[in-house]
Image (cartoon, rainbow, N blue to C red):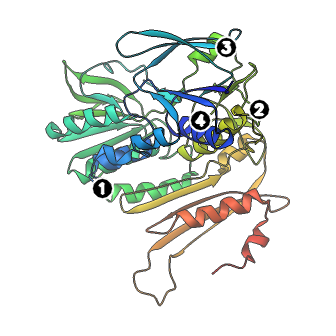
Amino acid sequence: MPRRIIIVGANAAGINAASAARKTDKEAEITLIERGKYPAYSRCGLPFVLSGEIPSFEDLTIFPSSYYKMMKLDLQTETTVKSVDPKEKKVQIESKDGTEESIKYDSLVLATGAHPFIPPIKGCNKSCVFPLRTIEDGKIIQEALKDTRSAVVIGAGLIGLEAAHAFVEKGIDVTVVEILPQVLPGMLDKDIADAFQNEVEKHDVRVILEKGVDEVLGEDRVNGVLVAGEKVGADLIILGTGVRPSTELVSQIGAEIGVSRGIKVNQQMMTNVPDVYAAGDCDESYSLINGQPCLCQLGTTAVRQGKVAGINAAGGHDAFKGVLGSAVSRMFNTEVGATGLTEFSAGRAGLKTVSGGLTAKTKAEYFPGAKEIKVKIIADQELGRILGGQIIAGEDVAQRINMISLAIENKMTVWELAKADTC
């Protein structure tokens, strides 16, 4: 009898788990269950559709419908998993029309992702207050922008700043409110963050730091927010306040939750429940540098975890070695990237560090069109081993961050990186 594999969630982790499982076991019965309308699309691209740099939300779709047929994947969208019975190895699902069905499995992969964190701010339930997590969110925001002259973005992480960039591109006045003392707090140290904030503010974006939004103002529809006693006018509010792992199903079946609030898994992406795996934004990762548990809710991480989970769920053998959190984005005509630990996160982990930085040009001085670049490297104080890197520049950040990432993975020191044979 063919192996029966059920995958809950058909986005980055889920679809890569399904593809890897199919390549591992040509005969397996693979079912993908997705509660949303749209399977396998790039969430990272949502703000850039709003800005107009990507023509439509449909362009974010990773695979055409023919891919699922070619790979013999039973894709069921707008379908919800109501419960899981790990003893009987079956899941109870409900389709859009209310029909319920019980499906047996040999291996179960939970790729349930994450959901937006809605902060406990008075008035957050008013009209025109939106998270930006799904295509459905994006389409609603896109429609609301037609009547928007000013916007407030709560949270200065990547999604928040990318949304602010989109609004600037549409000629909308934008204010970003961040309760912490810098932008991109999980990604950059304050010195690099301040330099990036300077680029943001050159585009007439007001950035308010170290203050939270006390209240969303307005009647049915918002007309502003209250920040430390000051009213900031806005027709639209974006909640860029992060996401939380979706762990409802694992709580039902007794799977262990890690200290990061993600599903705890081993290197094979297996939970403590037999034959149940987890991958993507819902699960806990481990730092490649110090082995400590962490949440790394990036699409690139979800892809790699999904492949490992799919291979093992199909009877193969693979291991996920951990994360560095390498990320890059482009907004306000500036690219920003980081990998590994910041000085702050290294300090919290008990590591003593040194750091160095420089400001230079992206090309040789004599070559026209060169743009400014700022690079920061963080290293272990005793051994000089590279722990992290941060870059902002007008161009070509991604491959430089990739170089630092590879250096960290290979435990290179700053001296070894300096002598590397590069072009």
The disc, 4 or 2, on the residue closer to the chain's N-terminal end is 2
Q: Is residue 104 left or right of residue 372?
A: right
Near mark 4 (Cα within 10 A), the count class, few <14, some 14-19 or many ≥20, is many
Residue that appears at 41% across and 86% down: 368
Q: Amino acid at mark 4?
A: Gly
Number of marks present in the image shown: 4
Secondary structure under badge 1? loop
Tag 3 or tag 1, which sits nearer the N-term?
Answer: 1
Q: Residue furthest right?
A: 382
Between 299 and 202, the residue placed more toward the observer is: 299
**Whether residue 226 is visible:** yes
Tell me if mark 2 has few (under 14), some (14-19) or many (20+) residues whose alpha carbon lies within 10 angstroms of its own: some
Image quadrant of residue 201? bottom left
Which residue in the structure is indicated by mark 2?
Answer: 266
Q: Looking at numbered disc 3 in the image, what kind of residue is underneath it?
A: Lys
Q: Which residue is mark 3?
A: 89
Above or below for 220 versus 229: above
Pointer 4 and pointer 2: residues touching (CB < 8 Å)?
no
Mark 4 and mark 1: Cα distance apart in space:
27 Å
Callout 2, which amino acid?
Answer: Asn
User: Circle 4 sits on which residue?
Assistant: 280
Say which label, 2 or 1, has the lower sequence index. Answer: 1
Q: Which type of secondary structure does the marked residue at label 2 adopt?
A: loop
- Residue closest to the eye, 269 or 27: 27
* 4 or 1: tag closer to the N-terminus: 1
Q: Which residue is mark 1?
A: 53
Decide: is 87 above or below 6: above
Q: Work out which residue is located at the far front of the displayed protein and give it.
A: 1
Callouts 2 and 1 close, C-beta under 8 Å: no
Q: Mark 1 belongs to which amino acid?
A: Glu
Give the position of the C terminus as an image quadrant.
bottom right
Residue 379 seen in this snapshot: no
